[in-house]
C-alpha cells in the first residue's frame, strides 16, 4: 500500500527519495553539487522543513526561497528544461510510492511554485 505525505516521517522519506533521483540526474546534479556546492545534510534539513511547512503547517522553515533561486539563477541559468526535469523527478518519486490527498497537494504545490519561480526569474 502507498503511503501519504501526512506525517513528518513520510515527508522525510519522500524527500530522501526525490533527492536520490535529483542527485543521479546528469543535468540537475551538478547544479546542486558544483554550482551551489550544497552541504547535503544541511540542505536536506531545510527542504524537509519546507515541505513540512507547506503540507503540515509546521513553522520550522523561515527562509527566502525565491531569493536563493534568484542568486543561483545568476550563476547558472535555470532553464525551462531544468524545471521540467525537476517536476518530472518530483512526480516520479510521488507516483512510485505515495498516494492520497497530501501527495496530491504536494504535486499541485510543486507545479505551482515551479511555474511561479520560472516566471519570476529574469531571462
Ligand atoms: C530547475 C529547478 C530547480 C533547481 C535546479 C533547484 C536547485 C536548488 C539548489 C541548487 C538549491 C541550493 C541553493 C543554495 O543552497 O545555495 C536549492 C534550494 C532550495 N530549493 Fe530549489 N531548485 C529548483 C526548483 C525548486 C522548486 C520548484 C522548489 C519549491 C517547490 C524549490 C525549493 C527549494 C528550497 C526550499 C530550497 C532550500 C533553500 C534554503 O536553503 O532554505 N526548488 N534549489
Image: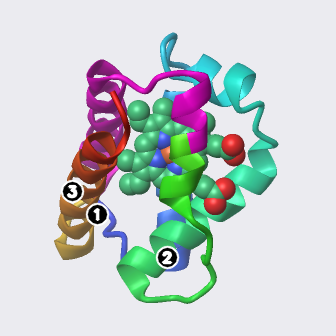
Q: Is residue 106 above or below residue 93?
A: below
**Residue at image point 48% right, 56% down:** 66
Q: Which mark is residue 112?
A: 3
Q: Residue 41, how many percent across, how many down?
A: 79, 50
Residue 103 placement (x, y as % from top left)? 26, 64
Which contiguous range is marked in magenta?
71-98
Q: Residue at x 53, y 69 (%)?
A: 50
Disc 3 on helix, strand or loop?
A: helix
Q: Quadrant of the N terminus?
A: bottom left
- Mark 1 vs 3, N-terminal side: 1
Whole-angstrom CA distance, mark 1 to mark 2, is 10 Å
**Element type at marker 2?**
helix
Q: Quadrant of the C terminus?
A: top left
Do callouts 1 and 3 mark residues in contact (Cβ within 8 Å)? no
Neighbour class for label 2 at 10 Å: few (<14), some, many (≥20)? many
Separation (CA) of disc 1 from disc 3: 10 Å
Residue drawn at x 26%, y 73% is 102
Q: Main secondary structure of the magenta part?
A: helix
| Above/below status of 121 relative to 44 | above
Tell me, yes or no, whether the highlighted magenta stretch contains residue 74. Answer: yes
In percent of width and height, residue 85 lies at 32, 25
Q: Which mark is residue 52?
A: 2
Q: Is residue 73 left or right of residue 90?
A: right
Amino acid at each position: 500500500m502507498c503511503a501519504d505525505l501526512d506525517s513528518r516521517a513520510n515527508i522525510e522519506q519522500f524527500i530522501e527519495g526525490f533527492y536520490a533521483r535529483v542527485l543521479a540526474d546528469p543535468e540537475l546534479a551538478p547544479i546542486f553539487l558544483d554550482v551551489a556546492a550544497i552541504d547535503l545534510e544541511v540542505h536536506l534539513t531545510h527542504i524537509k522543513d519546507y515541505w513540512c511547512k507547506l503540507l503540515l503547517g509546521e513553522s520550522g522553515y523561515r527562509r527566502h526561497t525565491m531569493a536563493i533561486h534568484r542568486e543561483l539563477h545568476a550563476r547558472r541559468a535555470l532553464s525551462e528544461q531544468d524545471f521540467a526535469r525537476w517536476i518530472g523527478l518530483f512526480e516520479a518519486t510521488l507516483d512510485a510510492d505515495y498516494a492520497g490527498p497530501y501527495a496530491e497537494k504536494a504535486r499541485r504545490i510543486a507545479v505551482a511554485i515551479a511555474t511561479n519561480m520560472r516566471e519570476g526569474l529574469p531571462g
